[in-house]
Amino acid sequence: MMLRLGPSAHWLLTRSTRRSHHIIGACLRLVLAGAVLPSAPLLGQSSTAATPGTTSAPATIPDFSVTDQFDRLLTRDALSGSSVIFLVASREGAEGAERWEAALRASARSRGVRIVSVADLKSAPRLLRRVIRRDFPKDTATGILMDFSGQLGRALRGERLPLVAVAYGADGRLRRAIELPLGRTDVTRAELLLTSAERP
């Protein structure tokens, strides 16, 4: 026996289906944005004080092995003997990271400091990784480490801050870790990071 639905029933089913699609879409956007619970603790605690504008980070560069959007591998050993500033961003902090990288890179090169950009993608669904990769810059000079495991990005950024900069000296030890503003760069803060990374 076939059940026939009247116009009202069809309207209700259509409305219910659309609502379900909206809910699923909203949940997906939250996952891609790296949404976390407000009570989630920061990772990578060290002796560095976490005051406003700063963040905790490991005392030495974490062991990592991460590729960029062009499948180029970078490891901790490859940075041995180099002063380095990591710019670590969630999806929310991605545009801000581009501005800060541009502000730091020219001076960093002449001062022997490496700038390494890291996208913290630990919250990204596995099925969407190829789609996410296609959205990254196509310029091979702009390599961004795509950290889906969280081994580097989450250890340096924690779980709440959208954009942080973490400076390590040539000995691999932490010099400074601070949260960066998203909407603008700051010459004073940039110089502080570079000077900290250069410090013996």
Image (cartoon, rainbow, N blue to C red):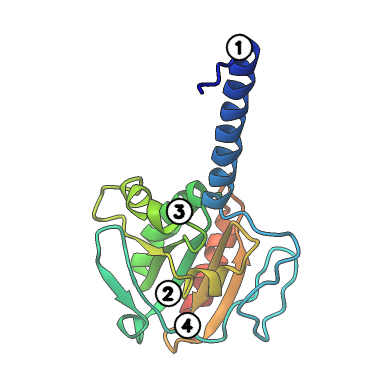
Comparing marks 2 and 1, which lies closer to the viewer? Answer: 1
Label 4, label 2: how far apart the Cα atoms are: 13 Å
- The type of residue carrying mark 3 is Ala
Label disc, if present, on residue 84 of the rendered structure: 2
Q: Report which residue position mark 3 lands on.
A: 103
Q: Position of residue 107 (x, y in %)?
A: 40, 62
Q: Earlier in the sequence, mark 4 or mark 3?
A: 4
Q: Position of residue 200 (x, y in %)?
A: 48, 87
- The type of residue carrying mark 1 is Gly
Q: Earlier in the sequence, mark 2 or mark 1?
A: 1
Q: Report which residue position mark 4 lands on.
A: 62
Residue at 59% x, 56% y is 162
Q: Earlier in the sequence, mark 3 or mark 1?
A: 1
Q: Earlier in the sequence, mark 1 or mark 4?
A: 1
Label 1, label 4: how far apart the Cα atoms are: 63 Å
Comparing marks 2 and 3, which lies closer to the viewer? Answer: 2
Q: Report which residue position mark 1 lands on.
A: 6
When the figure is inspected, residue 44 is found, relative to residue 139, above or below; the finding is: below
Label 2, label 1: how far apart the Cα atoms are: 67 Å
Residue 64: name its quadrant: bottom left
- The type of residue carrying mark 4 is Pro
Asked whether disc 1 touches disc 4, contact meaning CB atoms under 8 Å apart, the reply is no
Residue at 43% x, 65% y is 148
Answer left or right for 187 relative to 125. right
Q: Position of residue 143 (x, y in %)?
A: 31, 59
